[in-house]
Image (cartoon, helix red, strand yellow):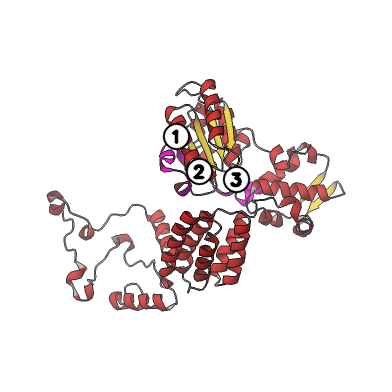
Amino acid sequence: MNEPLAERLRPKTLEDYVSQTHLVGEHGVLTNQIKQGLIPSIIFWGPPGIGKTTLANIIATESGRPFYTLSAISSGVKDVREVIDKAKQSGGLFTTKNPILFIDEIHRFSKSQQDSLLQAVEKGWVTLIGATTENPSFEVISALLSRCQVYILKPFEKADLETLLQRAIKEDVQLSDKKITLKETNALLKLSGGDARKLLNIFELIINSEESDNIIITDDSVLQKVQNNTVRYDKTGDQHYDIISAFIKSIRGSDPNGAVYWLARMIEGGEDVKFIARRLLISASEDIGNANPTALVIANNTFQAVSTIGYPESRIILSQCATYLACSPKSNAAYTAIGKAQQLVKQTGDLSVPLDIRNAPTKLMKELGYGDNYKYAHNYENNFANQEFLPDEIKNTKFYEPGNNARENAHREFLKQRWKDKYGY
């Protein structure tokens, strides 16, 4: 009876699984593999509470494989080897029934722990499914990563989360004796932050706090109940993304005091030092960019330094970097530029590279006109020659709009002198 609502409602089949249609929908990349039982080793990457563990369980069940699970938080190399030995005994080599070894939070495994998995994956003793909230390119060793398919799980849509709430009302035995009306859901959705597990557990807390069996859920009632019961639902780790968001927004908002406070909260909570440093690196480029290019240099040096030193001394280096970034002029021009360019690429597809700026390493390519009429900028006054670098279909398109700060105003003036009215600088 103490099992949380989120666990009681955990889907058991693909038909019950909500969201991730790009992976397990009718035409999802994993759908046929699951049905045929031909499962590769996989890394599921995505935020908490979006179904990584559930999907791993469903894959094992529907493919008829033995299933072993470990948590990277509490397991060591010895535990990994014990499970691999059991798996070798329960499944044949390179058969469709190879056991599945699921490792939750695989990014928390050390290099030696990840190394201990290599042979088992390579030899086919197990099919590995790892779950991570962190970019596997940084947190999973390259040798293991090369043996796995990386699938990104997308955050839940609003409709998905509302479907889960309706399912809870209709299907959960412990709620079946109550009349529950979802009049408003915005507060529930905001408090959950897109985490389905957190959403259902908050929902259960609200229901259990009501004395009446006729319950009407409104935004006001949810906020009132949650504020009075914060400790009961706010488990360790649930604030992980909220606090890093507050930290980055403080830097973006040029508030070093807010930045240091949220940094202290993460440090005291035992947050991974490299996780914080990576976010500083991203902020240095996304929020500061060319307004102060030195910010990226300092953030990169911070990442290198804390990776070598660790706690407790790293707190000083992180504080120096965070306060420096907070006090830097801000610009998201580079971030906006690549976003615009990527969107246009998606809309226009693979446009041909203009002949005059193509490379011509062979005689045939030269005969076909590759590189003809290319103007080598250094041969011209001010190292500039007016020519088109975009495909004809999108020529004169401006992606980069310099920000309003000293450095990027200089960029704007430079571009205005070169391109005059071409891009409207």
The furthest residue to the right: 212
Asked whether 153 falls inside the magenta stretch, the response is yes
Instruction: Name the residue beneath numbered marker 1.
Output: 118
Quick one: label 1, few (<14), some, or many (20+) residues within 10 Å? some
Q: Are marks 3 and 2 in contact (CB under 8 Å)?
A: no
Asked whether 252 falls inside the magenta stretch, the response is no
Image position of 416 with respect to 94: above or below: below
Instruction: Name the residue beneath numbered marker 3.
Output: 50
Quick one: label 2, few (<14), some, or many (20+) residues within 10 Å? some
What kind of residue is marked 3?
Answer: Ile
Which residue is rendered at x = 35% and y = 66% of the image? 397
Image x and y of residue 329, in percent: 47, 74
Q: Which residues are magenta?
A: 138-162
- Give the CA separation, mark 3 to mark 2: 25 Å
Given residues 317 and 183, the one toward you in this image is 317
What kind of residue is marked 1?
Answer: Leu
**Residue 380 appears in view:** yes
Disc 2 is placed on an element classified as loop
Q: Are marks 1 and 3 in contact (CB under 8 Å)?
A: no
**Residue 183 appears in view:** no
Q: Taking 329 as reference, is 56 left or right?
A: right
Image x and y of residue 144, in percent: 44, 38
Given residues 300 and 37, the one toward you in this image is 300
Instruction: Name the residue beneath numbered marker 2.
Output: 110
